[in-house]
Amino acid sequence: MGPKITVDSATMMNKALEVIEAKWLFDMPVEKIEVLIHPESIVHSLVEFVDGSVIAQLGRADMSGPIQYALTYPRRVAGAAKYLRLEQIGKLTFEKPNLKTFRALSLGFEVAQTGGTAAAVFNAANEAAVKLFLANKIKFVSIVELVEYCLNKHSARQKVSLEELLEADAWARKEVKNSVQRIAGSV
């Protein structure tokens, strides 16, 4: 993982973005999307059907398998990914995340519910804030504070053009840059 993805994992912004993706990619009502903390990082997704059965996608916490599959789709070929040995894992545990502790995740659910330009602002503000953090210009806790500040200041618009989404993206990046001293202070 690169530095940006590592930071997004630590803030749980990666999961917040996946909530938004799930809503749009699968036309899923936000209230039917659930996130669980899974320390072993073996179960990557679960889909529950109307009859209560669940199908899971399991694999090692390694991107070589998904990258290989993306390159060889629709075929599945032997290669880079190591085989999963559940007997070596022993047990799989799950717990609900604390949405107060993981504010980025809570914001992700709110953004998925809001729709429109909110997702563009959410993503752009996060990218700008993480960039500042990686440059040692803000504290780690300031990332989510800046994202939330931008969302609160933004009036989300629905059914917008690509140009309007790009404008919202640019606005959020500029707003993060302009708000650093006021919201986050400096390192």
Image (spheres, grey):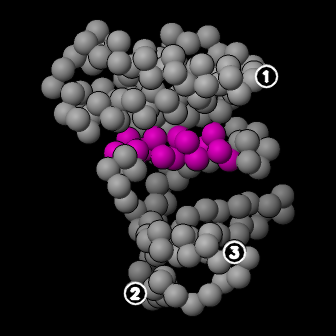
User: Of label 2 and label 1, which has the lower sequence position?
Assistant: 2
Label 1 neighbour load within 10 Å: few <14, some 14-19, many 20+: few
Q: Is residue 160 left or right of residue 121?
A: right
| Residue placed under numbered mark 2 in the picture | 88
User: Of label 3 and label 2, which has the lower sequence position?
Assistant: 3
Observer-nearest of 132 and 49 = 132
Q: Amino acid at mark 1?
A: Lys
In the image, residue 70 sits, relative to residue 27, either above or below, namely below
Query: Which residues make up the magenta segment?
Result: 7-22
Which image quadrant is residue 146 in?
top left
Q: Amino acid at mark 2?
A: Gln
In the image, residue 57 sits, relative to residue 76, either above or below, namely above
- For the point 66% across and 83% down, the residue is 76
Name the spot of residue 36 as percent of width and height, x first: 52, 53
User: Of label 3 and label 1, which has the lower sequence position?
Assistant: 3
Q: Secondary structure at mark 2?
A: helix
Magenta region, main secondary structure: helix
Name the spot of residue 104 as percent of width and height, x first: 45, 34
| Residue placed under numbered mark 3 in the picture | 73
Name the spot of residue 138 as percent of width and height, x first: 23, 27
